[in-house]
Amino acid sequence: ISQIKLKLILVGKEGVGKSATGNTILGNKVFESKLGAKPVTETCKTGRRNWNGKEVVVIDMPDIFSPEASDTETYREISHCIVFSAPGPHALVLVTQLGRYTEEDKKTVKRVREIFGVEAMRHMIVLFTRKEDLGGDSLKAYVRNSENKNLKELIQACKYRYCAFNNKAIGTERDEQVNELMRITERMVKENGGRCYTNELYSETTKCVVETLAVRVMPEAQQLPPSTDLWRKGPVPLGQPPGQGVKGLSHWKQL
């Protein structure tokens, strides 16, 4: 693979160890990670490292997929994520806790597909946290013997791309976990023709950013009424047919 940069977006519900996973990948404590009633990740954050001669960019997304997340928060954080990962991520890493793949996790996957489009599944990797709970058993055996139908359907949809992290691991054990994830990522990128994931959503958001910045920096543009073309569209509820906008997430005009 010729890429000199690999971009990974971490998605998942709160409390599964998503930020800790980001820190494991980066080999350093970049993202705040602790137990608590309040979500630790409230806005998109990024970190980067060098791995095997490549720059690896990790984007830690907040739990915008929960029912409590407002539309405003959702669209704002999606726009941040897309700007950080433009022209597109190489991998969408769904973080879930070993033995705890629930209906909430299933809804998260559904929202990811609604936001990024069904083609995003070709770029998704499932990452289980709490690998230490396996004891002496293999992850492959755990997945094969699981009675969780939803989990098996997800693994199949992701072409059996999955791995597990013990986020308390250090040294060689931690490095081997990261190497496995990166090997899966590189293999997936190769299978996808060496391309990152992108769709109309990325080009549309880039256009929105340029337009919004223009409004903020040009005094005359700031005097435009709300009815002006720049502000003409608000968010369309997710799950509705994207007849007026981008495939996956119907587009918005205000960041």
Image: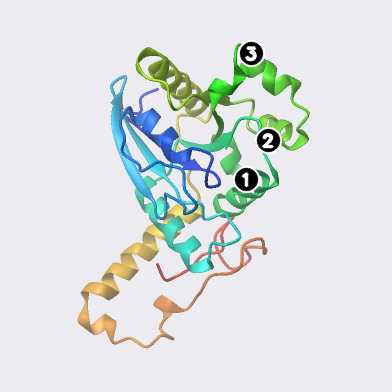
Front-lying residue, 70 or 188: 70
Please rate how many residues cluster around mark 2, counting C-alpha atoms within 10 Å: few if below 14, some from 14 to 19, many from 20: some
| Disc number for residue 154 | 2
Name the kind of residue labelled 2 in the image. Answer: Leu
Q: Which residue is mark 3?
A: 137
Q: Earlier in the sequence, mark 3 or mark 1?
A: 1
Pointers 2 and 1 in contact (C-beta within 8 Å): yes
Q: Earlier in the sequence, mark 3 or mark 2?
A: 3
Name the kind of residue labelled 1 in the image. Answer: Val
Question: In front: mark 3 or mark 1?
Answer: 3
Q: Quadrant of residue 22?
A: top left
How is the model colour-coded?
A: rainbow
Residue at the (69%, 16%) spot, across then down:
141
Tell me: 137 left or right of 216. Answer: right
Name the kind of residue labelled 3 in the image. Answer: Asp
| Disc number for residue 109 | 1
- How far from the left and from the top, in percent, is residue 72? 48, 68
Front-lying residue, 147 or 37: 37
Q: Secondary structure at mark 3?
A: loop
- How far from the left and from the top, in percent, is residue 11? 51, 43
| Count of marks, rendered view | 3
Q: Quadrant of the N terminus?
A: top left
Query: In the rendered view, would you say 11 is above or below 72?
Result: above
Q: Quadrant of residue 119?
A: top right
Pointers 3 and 1 in contact (C-beta within 8 Å): no
Please rate how many residues cluster around mark 1, counting C-alpha atoms within 10 Å: few if below 14, some from 14 to 19, many from 20: many
Query: In the rendered view, would you say 118 is above or below 254?
Result: above
Please rate how many residues cluster around mark 3, counting C-alpha atoms within 10 Å: few if below 14, some from 14 to 19, many from 20: few
